[in-house]
Image (cartoon, grey):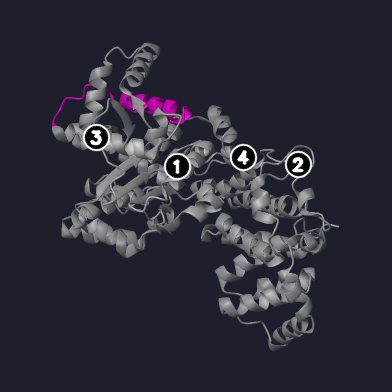
Amino acid sequence: MAKPILIHGIPTSGKTTLLKKIGKECIEQSPDTIVIFLSLGKIWDKTDKINIKKQANNQFHKGSGGEINWNSKNQKYLILLDGLDEVVSNTKRNDTIIEVKNILNDPNIQIILSSRTNDYIREDKKIDNTFEKFELMPLTIDDMEQMGRHILTNQTKAASFIKMLKKSKLAQVFPKTPLTTILLAILFKEETITPKDLPRNLTELYAKFMDLFLNKWDKNKGISEQFKIKQKEFILHKIAFQMHQDKKTIITKSELINKLSQLINEYDYRNIDPQTFIKNILERSNILIQISGEESYSFFHLTIQEYLVASQLTSDQENLLCNTFEEEWWLNPNIFYAGKQPNYAGLLNKIKDKPIYTFLVQPIDLDDLIAHVIHLPKVLLAAHQLPKITQQKIIKNVVIKFDYLIKNIILFFIPDNIIEKDFKTIPLFSKKIERRIYNKTILDIILFAREFFKDCLGSQYFIERLEEIWNEFIQTPEKTPISEITLYCLAYRLAVSKKDATYLEEFINKWNPNVRWYRIIDVDMNIIGLKYSSKKTRLNFKSKYSKNEKYIQSQFQQKIARHYNSITGLQ
């Protein structure tokens, strides 16, 4: 029985393209295998219950007119399920995974699923237990160069493009993915951007792309401009916004005509005919595309829909983004919105000050708090021209919320005399927390916290601000508001980034934490390849943990419930 495969990666990393390439190669190399490609977002837009075999049969019938005989023992099937992240409801995602698991007993069916990398696929045990996971990593500069050469057939232009990639900060500003590389190369080819006039962030890149495809396309074709550019773009904004609010990636023809008619009446666009508008947008821009064999439409990529949503929002509408901030569905619109005015902190300040938790007053939603801590730095990266003091305040806010998450959710509510039946009665613990935490050892939690901190604040862009926060903490260690586990995560992040052991040594010297940390940090130093500041310091560390070796080793094997006081500093 072949284990199903999950391919995941950041937006625009090429998941859909890879699925289709796998399907194409399977048809060429194994022509007897039936290959079916299904878009999960589009399936769930039309139904409240998923049946993968039924959906696959419908797709097969559309293409061939025949029916699939699932009982045939000699027939092989490859089912490609695209876009689990486009299934907005966790209940529907869970139903999708259950449906996949129901098919596992059929040895003739191989399933490959794709999704954006998100908390759902990283943390949910059903995913880990069901799928073999593969992550699409960012492109290298060499990969980006090769793609540029294919698009820019002119050698002089290609050389100029490659020089721009190497010498500018483009590779730092944009996600290194196939789609962003293709957009950059197309814009460079059309001379919409030059090495002296580069987009500053992802939002500007998409804005230039929209301008090119809505404006230049018509001019290049020699067709008279029937609709004003601003009208066309405004209408697309409104369509995208409606679809995103409805949590949909497709819109039927009747829904689209109704929406266009409403906009024409509302804004007095008398020069626009809905049918002609749809025809022109489909034929001349390819921004909105018709789904094959259906009278329904979608934006050619979900990020286009997300960009259009964000680009039409004003500061008066920021509460929408703030209120939906913890939802994965609204993360990219937040990022695109922050990139519109990268020197504007209004939205970020609203999010920073959002009272998403109230200690011991109301139940805490673990998933919301985790999402908040992960999403906030991502949006901050988009607002890359904020003053240093503003950046520092926001990053410090993330550090404190991270500490709250680790200390008060994962550790604080686990009494050291806990037994399993009592654990399940604690009202602030969801089943997810129960699965993740109950049997974890103290070492498990430390390593989990360290990786989670890196996921949140791993960008080099944050390093200077993190160092400023660290220096602020060590000046008054007695007033430092965070736990030793968070201090360790901060010290470790700085030590790795700057290749300097000073931060880890300061953690020990300034806060005098539990002796277990001497052993943890000595192992860190060896693995990272750092040197102690002096021979005396190295001997002191080794002496400390050698004298307490049995005690430390026993701690590392014990459940976290026995050590929540010492590791958090809470008494």
Q: Nearer the viewer, mark 1 or mark 4?
A: 1
Q: Position of residue 372 (x, y in %)?
A: 61, 44
As shown in the figure, which amino acid type bears the numbered disc 3?
His
As shown in the figure, which amino acid type bears the numbered disc 1?
Glu
Please give the residue where the numbered disc 3 appears in the rendered image.
61
Whether pointer 3 and pointer 4 mark residues with C-beta atoms closer than 8 Å, the reply is: no
How far apart marks 2 and 3 lie (CA) works out to 50 Å
Please give the residue where the numbered disc 2 appears in the rendered image.
427
Question: Would you say the magenta stretch is mainly helix, strand or loop?
Answer: helix
As shown in the figure, which amino acid type bears the numbered disc 4?
Ile
Label whose residue precedes the other's in the sequence (2 or 3): 3
Residue at image coords 28%, 46%: 72
Q: Residues within 10 Å of mark 1 (few under 14, many from 20)?
A: some
Where residue 99 is drawn, which disc sits there?
1
Label whose residue precedes the other's in the sequence (2 or 1): 1
Q: Residues within 10 Å of mark 3 (few under 14, many from 20)?
A: few
